[in-house]
């Protein structure tokens, strides 16, 4: 379909395979000319189109790709109104390739984009084209389910309706959907997404191009978590009475909280921010807590030791995601980028494929889709590398732009501070002047933003683990914090979206808005400030989280000084001016890393664990999703199979 | 051509591994290719696996070769299903690949196809005694001796229903058969002797001079030529330096 006319050439040429340097000049040395809209081009493309449509079924009215189909668009431009093909059309059996991708193989036009994506970008060569000629068929080996975390992207790549989204099958037509641009919160990368809604319901999530972050890919969790937004939702306030949760009005819920706040010591009150909170609501909660005099604040449910006091560079992915492509050596410390940030892993693989990119891994062995040197399992190896005693240290030393990725499983340990210091030293082993390759790979979308606004214990305050300990607190506010076990005893106020762990533990539940239902700022692991757009509205009586906090502050008699999101943002920008610069990264101080490296400390001997137990179950939305549960089952089965081999 | 799938699970062997000799040989094949390009040896290895497995490729054999070469199983399956020389289901002891392309059909291959249907059965089905199976293939490249059939490793040429029936019967009975042309001629030489360039006068020098032998006989060595890397044709010019550049001035 890319045929063009070349001046002086008797035949049309395929522009995808014809270099400009192959174009010949005219007889008098004029520069070559290429035509794209001549009658000859049109006729040639019509000819190709006729061949493409020979075996393509005319089932657009029942095809999920209808309305956003490349072949349909081309047929509108170059198709003829009738067919000269009198023979039978080819029929192809549909294949099973997993729970996310539905196949209708009659429609396949053998472009093999899906095969190339899985092999080259995802790095999991599971799809292939068997047979040949007209009988070519795209399939997995013996129709096993695909295991890549990026497999959903083949649906976007497929130019026809041969590979479509299984969970979204026959759900909506593209022209009925409202499209909102937003930012993903399933991992800390902040991939650019487009949320498609019909009425109030989120129908699907698609990637947007953002070369700085996700290029054009998103992970399966980002894409298919959609059904989790419908299930298990909290749509009205609840109050626990006699061990049972009963529906309540906002007024009663607020009164119950106010009564508790009035009778509780400030020292025995605390607040924890979860992994999906926007910067605005974190800021509002901190504001409210400060007005109450509470210092027990924390945003690090998993116990990560990162501290804003160490400087902003100490908790950012300083190399930047796009910077991976310029790096010339990589040390991964206790991280599994494939699980913790699947799109970032594709970027590392892209760099690895370019060659001359030594990669070392310390921590748990995993199939990362690229080759790496396994250096060791625990902090001792990291100490050797940092001290220059390990042979990988010489690789880092030679490199101009070495990157050290530090995972959450290294930092969320009691000795995390010592390990962070070691990693900072390893990041300083090599590299040219001014280079900062110390890169913290966060797993929570809210974490960097919350650290930026300083949602950490104040002077004499308790951290998350201490707050959750038995008998530590009498009153605890959870802003979507579900990944931490709160010991019995404390009165828990849960502001969140799903009936998950936090809601089960709560004494008062205030229903909030999930990420497609509110506009908010997220700061990704690089420190890039991004604005998520609103696509829908919270269900039932649920409200946006900042509005809940604002209303609660009024009842508590400590009214927050903003009545709209715009005013809240103004206050936020005034306090933290770098958040004003959307889509940009405020430069972090390289000296912070040197200071961090100098902190020292003695790490324990224990080997690094893993940050995510199950890629598909990392947050309340994913845990409510049936699709994610299916994916998790398949991944478990695959893991058992691989272990058996 | 038709859709090619692996054989039914019921007849797939439970395991496959190269014999010691074949494994040695396979390692030699793999060593022919530079580091990182081991997958290039797949055709040779699959072919040897097919020989070892008795003329067809079981699923486990494809997986064994894929593992040996460190490739994804789907990559090996792609190759095995692409090439028709790999049989994905068991074939007879003598597997007949009958050419059904134009020159052979013009010389009567359609009659041979019907004959195979009648005596052996459906394509890719093994005959009752397990000796024979057949399949129609595209051009075998011996059109000058059409019609042609390849049976295991040998070509049988100049076939007629009569001599083909006899070949099949002899093979099934375990008798010796003669590969090559089934009529009186050597290789692709004209049957019944030369038909052109037979006039001795052609080999005379000048008018009425003494007769000479042909300049070259079949037995003679050919004239030594330049090595292949020495160009006999003119070296192509770059577009800048060609005639269009001259026309400019």
Image (tube, rainbow, N blue to C red):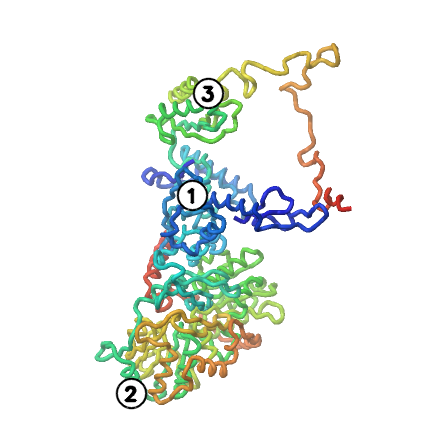
Quadrant of residue A587 within the rendered picture: bottom right
Quadrant of residue A566 in the image?
Answer: bottom left
- Give the residue pinned by disc 3: B159
Q: Is residue A291 left or right of residue A23?
A: left
- Residue B75 percent coordinates (x, y): 46, 46
Taking the spot 67% from the left edge, 36% from the top edge, the residue there is: B229
Q: Secondary structure at mark 3?
A: loop
Q: Position of residue A584 (x, y in %)?
A: 53, 72
Percent position (x, y) of residue A573?
49, 81
Tag 1 subunit:
A
Count of numbered labels shown in the rendering: 3
Residue denoted by label 1? A55
Name the residue at 68% across, 25% down. B223
Q: Residue at x 38, y 43 (%)?
A: A92
Secondary structure found at label 2: helix
Front position among marks 3 and 1: 1
Q: Can the viewer see residue A589 in this picture?
A: yes
Tags 1 and 2 both on a single chain: yes
Is residue A605 at all visible to an observer of this figure? no
Q: Mark 2 Cα within 10 Å, few/some/many (few <14, many 20+)?
A: few
């Amino acid at each position: 379909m890319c045929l063009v006319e070349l001046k002086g050439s008797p035949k049309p040429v395929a522009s995808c395979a014809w270099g400009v340097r192959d174009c010949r000049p005219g007889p008098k040395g004029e520069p070559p000319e290429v035509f794209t809209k001549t009658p000859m081009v049109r006729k040639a493309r019509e000819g190709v189109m006729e061949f493409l449509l020979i075996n393509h079924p005319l089932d657009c009215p029942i095809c999920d790709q209808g309305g956003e189909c490349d072949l349909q668009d081309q047929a509108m431009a170059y198709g003829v109104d009738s067919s000269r093909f009198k023979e039978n059309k080819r029929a192809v059996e549909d294949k099973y390739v997993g729970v996310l991708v539905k196949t209708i193989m009659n429609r396949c036009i053998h472009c093999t984009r899906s095969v190339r994506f899985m092999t080259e970008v995802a790095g999991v060569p599971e799809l292939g084209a068997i047979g040949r000629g007209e009988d070519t068929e795209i399939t997995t080996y013996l129709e096993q389910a695909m295991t890549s975390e990026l497999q959903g992207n083949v649906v976007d790549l497929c130019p026809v309706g041969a590979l479509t989204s299984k969970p979204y099958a026959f759900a909506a037509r593209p022209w009925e959907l409202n499209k909102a641009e937003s930012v993903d919160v399933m991992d800390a990368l902040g991939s650019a997404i487009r949320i498609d809604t019909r009425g109030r319901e989120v129908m699907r999530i698609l990637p947007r191009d953002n070369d700085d972050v996700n290029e054009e890919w998103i992970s399966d969790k980002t894409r298919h978590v959609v059904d989790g937004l419908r299930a298990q939702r909290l749509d009205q306030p609840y109050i626990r009475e006699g061990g049972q949760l009963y529906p309540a009005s906002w007024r009663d819920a607020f009164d119950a909280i106010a009564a508790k706040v009035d009778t509780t010591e400030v020292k025995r009150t605390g607040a924890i921010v979860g992994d999906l909170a926007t910067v605005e609501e974190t800021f509002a909660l901190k504001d409210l807590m400060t007005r109450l005099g509470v210092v027990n604040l924390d945003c690090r449910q998993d116990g990560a030791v990162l501290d804003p006091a160490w400087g902003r560079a100490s908790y950012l992915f300083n190399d930047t995601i796009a910077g991976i492509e310029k790096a010339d050596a990589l040390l991964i410390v206790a991280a599994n980028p494939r699980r913790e940030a699947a799109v970032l892993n594709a970027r590392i693989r892209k760099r690895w494929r370019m060659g001359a990119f030594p990669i070392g891994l310390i921590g748990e062995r995993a199939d990362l889709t690229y080759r790496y040197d396994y250096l060791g399992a625990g902090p001792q190896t990291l100490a050797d590398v940092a001290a220059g005693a390990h042979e990988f240290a010489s690789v880092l030393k030679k490199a101009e732009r070495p990157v050290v990725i530090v995972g959450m499983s290294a930092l969320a340990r009691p000795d995390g501070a010592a390990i962070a210091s070691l990693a900072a030293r390893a990041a300083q082993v090599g590299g040219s002047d001014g280079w900062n390759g110390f890169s913290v790979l966060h797993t929570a979308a809210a974490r960097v933003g919350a650290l930026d606004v300083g949602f950490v214990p104040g002077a004499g305050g308790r951290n998350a683990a201490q707050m959750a300990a038995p008998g530590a607190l009498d009153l605890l506010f959870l802003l979507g914090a579900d990944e931490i076990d709160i010991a019995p005893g404390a009165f828990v106020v849960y502001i969140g979206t799903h009936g998950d762990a936090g809601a089960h533990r709560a004494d008062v539940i205030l229903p909030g808005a999930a990420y497609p239902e509110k506009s908010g700022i997220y700061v990704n692991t690089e420190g890039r400030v991004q604005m998520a757009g609103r696509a829908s509205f919270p269900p039932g009586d649920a409200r946006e989280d900042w509005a809940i906090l604002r209303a609660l502050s009024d009842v508590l008699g400590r009214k927050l000084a903003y009545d709209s999101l715009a005013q809240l943002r103004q206050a936020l920008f005034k306090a933290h001016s770098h958040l004003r610069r959307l889509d940009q990264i405020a430069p972090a101080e390289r000296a912070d890393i040197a200071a961090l490296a100098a902190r020292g400390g003695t790490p324990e001997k224990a080997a690094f664990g893993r940050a995510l137990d199950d890629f598909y179950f990392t947050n309340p939305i994913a845990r409510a999703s049936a699709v994610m549960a299916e994916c998790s089952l398949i991944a478990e089965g695959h893991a058992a199979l691989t272990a058996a081999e | 051509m038709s859709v090619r799938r692996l054989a039914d699970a019921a007849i797939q062997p439970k395991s496959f591994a190269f014999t010691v000799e074949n494994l040695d040989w396979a390692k030699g094949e793999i060593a022919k290719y530079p580091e990182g390009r081991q997958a290039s040896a797949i055709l040779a290895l699959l072919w040897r696996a097919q020989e070892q497995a008795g003329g067809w490729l079981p699923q486990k054999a494809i997986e064994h070769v894929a593992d040996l070469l460190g490739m994804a199983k789907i990559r090996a399956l792609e190759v095995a299903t692409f090439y028709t020389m790999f049989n994905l289901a068991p074939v007879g002891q003598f597997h007949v690949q009958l050419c059904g392309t134009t020159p052979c059909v013009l010389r009567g291959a359609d009659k041979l196809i019907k004959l195979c249907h009648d005596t052996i059965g459906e394509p890719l089905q093994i005959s009752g005694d397990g000796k024979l199976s057949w399949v129609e293939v595209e051009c075998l490249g011996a059109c000058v001796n059409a019609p042609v059939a390849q049976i295991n490793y040998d070509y049988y040429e100049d076939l007629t229903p009569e001599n083909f029936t006899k070949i099949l019967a002899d093979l099934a009975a375990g008798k010796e058969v003669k590969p090559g042309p089934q009529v009186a001629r050597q290789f692709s030489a004209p049957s019944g002797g030369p038909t052109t360039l037979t006039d001795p006068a052609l080999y005379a020098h000048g008018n009425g001079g003494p007769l000479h032998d042909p300049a070259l006989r079949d037995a003679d060595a050919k004239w030594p030529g330049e090595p292949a890397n020495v160009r006999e044709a003119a070296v192509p010019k770059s577009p800048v330096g060609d005639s269009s550049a001259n026309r400019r001035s």
